[in-house]
Amino acid sequence: MDQTFGKKYKLCRQKLIDSVFKQGASVKQYPFVLHFLEVDEVLEAPFQITISAPKRLFRKAHDRNRIKRLMRETVRKNKINLETFITDNNKNLALFMVYTNREEMPYEVLLKKTEQLFSQLIQKIASNDTTKQQS
């Protein structure tokens, strides 16, 4: 799989974003919170994601933009594990990733935390599938 992160991976539909917060679950790995929802409809990519850095924490736009740029890069580097799991299980996910730390963290730390976050997400989805199958 390639490491590109184009437009097809961007979650832009407002109704879908709202449903992620209303019906979805979340996974936390400091400094990230990842809200997710398993979607029945077929998306352009196995998952679509929106990345956010709150204005309340980062007043200046250039600080928010830098954080979001770093987050996009870490997602691009670590998406292969998540993408293979999703495609193997024939799922589609809508994701909303929020940065919660007050200061910018080094890129290497963010890269490792994103990898841990995606592995937690995979575990949570897999455990939800096993509980549904047992019911």
Image (tube, grey):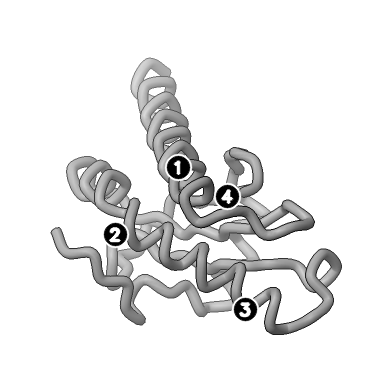
Circles 2, 1 touching at the beta carbon (< 8 Å): no
Instruction: First in sequence, mark 2 or 1: give its number.
Output: 2
Q: How many neighbours does mark 2 have within 10 angstroms: few (below 14), some (14-19), or many (20 or more)?
A: some
Asked if residue 57 is positioned above or below residue 27 in the image, the reply reads: below
Query: Which dot marks residue 46?
Result: 2
The image quadrant that residue 16 belongs to is: bottom right
Distance from disc 1 to disc 4, alpha carbons, whole Å, reads 15 Å
Mark 3 vs mark 4: which is more N-terminal? 4
**Quick one: label 1, few (<14), some, or many (20+) residues within 10 Å?**
few
85 lies left or right of 123:
left
Task: Decide which of 129, 82 is in the foreground and name it.
Answer: 82
Residue type for callout 3: Asn
Q: CA distance from mark 2 to mark 1?
A: 22 Å
> Which callout, 1 or 4, points at the residue further toward the start of the chain?
4
Which dot, 2 or 3, sits closer to the camera? 3
Q: Name the amino acid type tagged 1.
A: Lys
Q: Earlier in the sequence, mark 2 or mark 3?
A: 2
Total residue callouts: 4
**Residue topped by disc 3:** 65
Three-letter amino acid code of the residue under disc 4: Leu
Q: Residue at 62% of width from left, 50% of height from top?
A: 23
